[in-house]
Image (cartoon, grey):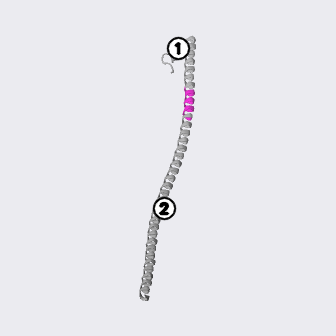
């Protein structure tokens, strides 16, 4: 029985008037239960739609996060490439600087060597001229 306060046994119901009242109450109760059931179904459908909408938003958020993560990773790779390029460039610059310093030292050494050779050659010329002057003066002395 849906309503325990209403009589269920035909002997307890009595007259047809009571039967009609019981039937009306039973119908009213059934309609109320049907309305509750329809409301529950409606709420279930709304909850299902809300869940689908939330799932859709969650999937979109995941997709956006994945996309953002990919962009961030690509940016990170570009930064790594830039750092590697900078380090290689720095290494090449240090190598070029070292080669330049060595070339400057070699140039200074070569200039010093040329200067020494020039001094030696000048000294030889000077000594040769002194010899010529001495020989000339010696000849002049002998001829007198």
Q: Which residue is mark 2?
A: 96
Q: Mark 1 touching mark 2, by CB under 8 A?
A: no
Mark closest to the chain's N terminus, 1 or 2: 1
Q: Nearer the viewer, residue 42 or 122?
A: 122
Say above or below: 6 vs 40: above
- Please tell me which residue is depicted at 46% across the width and 73% down the height of the picture: 118
Answer with the quarter of the image where residue 20 lies.
top right
Say above or below: 80 vs 138: above
Q: Which residue is mark 1?
A: 13
Q: Nearer the viewer, residue 12 or 69?
A: 69
- Image coordinates of residue 18 in percent, x first then y, are 55, 12
- Image coordinates of residue 129 in percent, x first then y, are 45, 79
Q: CA distance from mark 1 to mark 2?
A: 114 Å
- Please tell me which residue is depicted at 49% across the width and 53% down the height of the picture: 83
Q: Is residue 51 magenta?
A: yes
Instruction: Find the magenta span and give its range.
Output: 40-52
Looking at the image, how many numbered discs can be counted on the residues? Answer: 2
Question: Disc 1 on helix, strand or loop?
Answer: helix
- Image coordinates of residue 101 in percent, x first then y, are 45, 63
């Amino acid at each position: 029985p849906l309503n325990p306060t209403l009589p269920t046994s035909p002997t307890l119901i009595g007259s047809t008037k009571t039967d009609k009242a019981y039937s009306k109450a039973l119908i009213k109760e059934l309609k109320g239960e049907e309305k509750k059931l329809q409301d529950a179904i409606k709420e279930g459908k709304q909850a299902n739609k809300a869940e689908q909408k939330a799932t859709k938003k969650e999937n979109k958020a995941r997709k956006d996060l994945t996309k953002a993560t990919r962009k961030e990773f690509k940016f990170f790779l570009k930064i790594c490439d830039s750092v590697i390029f900078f380090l290689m460039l720095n290494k090449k610059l240090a190598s070029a600087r070292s080669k330049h310093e060595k070339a400057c030292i070699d140039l200074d050494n070569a200039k010093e060597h040329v200067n020494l050779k020039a001094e030696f050659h000048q000294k030889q010329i000077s000594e040769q001229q002194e010899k010529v002057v001495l020989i000339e003066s010696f000849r002049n002395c002998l001829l007198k």
